[in-house]
Image (cartoon, grey):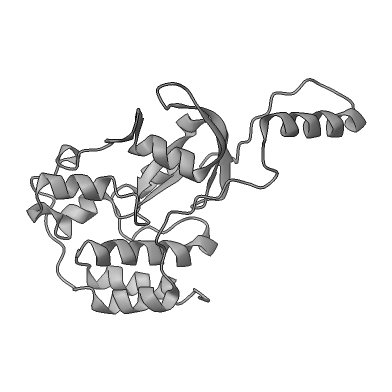
Amino acid sequence: MRVTHVSARFPRVTRHGAVVVLAAVAALVGVSAQPASATPPGIPSKATAQSQLNALTVATQGSTSGYSRDLFPHWITISGSCNTREQVLKRDGTSVVVDSSCAATSGRWYSPYDGATWTAASDVDIDHVVPLAEAWRSGASSWTTSRRQSFANDLSRPQLIAVTDNVNQSKGDQDPSTWQPPLSSYRCTYSKMWITVKYNWSLTLQTSEKSALQSMLNTCSS
């Protein structure tokens, strides 16, 4: 895992002068003193998530036979020249600047999975909280391509989040029984996100997955 990285290119100055320079630059570019905080919409309360978890259907996990990411078309155009990835980068970042094609040229992104902050969009992945292959195994194999596209680009629920790229890659298509965010303090939120996505998309879950989600949800205070 990479070390937390926050880049800053300022001229070398004395300790006293650094305070003045940093304050002036922050005022000019509008950089927030607070870290960016990725907060997808629609994260339920503990009580709501518990009700949703209780209502989910437990079933044997399906096969990945026939699965392809191409069957979940993404990223799609959302507004103007901005696609889904670019929309999430703007939503989850701080002081994000984009060019004419909507590509992020600067900004700050805090990854709640591991607590790292990044200043290059190339260091950030957009994670599907419920991975596409996991959705396939949980019921999406019978969906139309249009429905799978909607799932893969869902901006109205907590299904997409900007996180450190190699942390996302280490997660792969695992469910919470085998992978949870390295930052244990975020596991409560992660469980609520996972549960409500599966509930709203009528996906099933395995016994081991439900047990892991319940343990994570139990750590929530609200």
The residue shown at (32%, 47%) is 172
- Residue 173 at x, y = what percent? 28, 50
Question: Is 62 situated above or below 17?
Answer: below
- Residue 16 at x, y = what percent? 92, 32
Q: Is residue 110 left or right of residue 198?
A: right
22 or 79: nearer the viewer: 79
26 or 64: nearer the viewer: 26
Q: Is residue 76 left or right of residue 166?
A: left
The residue shown at (16%, 63%) is 61
Question: Is 10 situated above or below 124?
Answer: above
214 or 107: nearer the viewer: 107
Q: Is residue 21 left or right of residue 159?
A: right
- Residue 151 at x, y = what percent? 24, 50
Image quadrant where residue 6 sits:
top right
Decide if residue 31 is in sight here.
yes
The residue shown at (42%, 61%) is 190
Image quadrant where residue 79 sits:
top left
